Image (tube, rainbow, N blue to C red):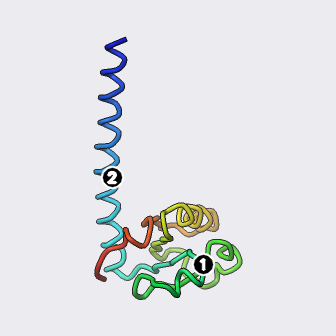
Amino acid sequence: MKTFVIVGVIIGFLFVFVKKIQSKGDKQMVQEWIQSGAVVVDVRTKSEFAEGHFPGSINIPVDVLPNELGAIKNKQSKIVVYCRSGARSERAKQILTASGYSSVINAGGLGDMPNSR
């Protein structure tokens, strides 16, 4: 029993450690993509967008994204999506990928976005 607890703690620690490394790498990639001219899409509601958004981002709420795909004409463009927590942007990433957009990254929430362009 004691061995199972120790193994569980070790696995939990490794999971958290790997997740932090992955998160840091994703944040660096988001920043690099934005600096190289990626299309930044805020998939929150129009009212959330009006309250504050990442500079230069466009607002396409995830609910209407399937009908507004024409706003992002080049399917090879690098696209960074974000919302409030990362859940809606993950859904947006799935919609875009399924629609043929080849380079999409979920940046998470507005608070996860880089501080400067």
Other-residue count near label 2 (Cα within 10 Å), few / some / many at <14 / 14–19 / ≥20: few
Vertical comparison of 49 with 17: above or below? below
The residue at 44%/68% (across/down) is 109
Q: In this view, does 54 lie above or below 7?
A: below
How packed is label 1: few (under 14 Cα within 10 Å), some, or many (20 or more)?
some
Q: Picture coordinates of residue 117 (x, y %)? A: 31, 83
Distance from disc 1 to disc 2, alpha carbons, whole Å, reads 28 Å
Residue lying at 50% horizontally and 71% vertically, measured from the top left: 83
In which image quadrant can residue 69 be found? bottom right
Residue at screen point 52% across, 67% down: 102
Q: In this view, does 1 lie to the left or right of 66?
A: left
Please give the count of numbered marks on the rendered protein. Answer: 2
Give the position of the N terminus as an image quadrant: top left
Hey, what amino acid is under mark 1? Thr
Lower position in the chain sequence, tag 1 or tag 2: 2
Residue under pointer 2: 22
Q: What element carries label 1?
A: loop
- Tell me which residue sits at (62%, 72%) in the image: 62
Closer to the observer: label 1 or label 2?
Answer: 1
Q: Position of residue 67 (x, y in %)?
A: 71, 78
Query: Residue 27: x, y in percent?
Result: 33, 64
Task: Tell me the kind of residue under disc 2.
Answer: Gln
Q: Is residue 80 left or right of residue 25?
A: right
Which residue appears farthest toward the right when viewing the image? 67
Q: Are marks 1 and 2 in contact (CB under 8 Å)?
A: no
- In this image, 8 relative to 50: left or right? left
Q: Mark 1 points at which residue?
A: 45
Which one is in front, 52 or 107?
52
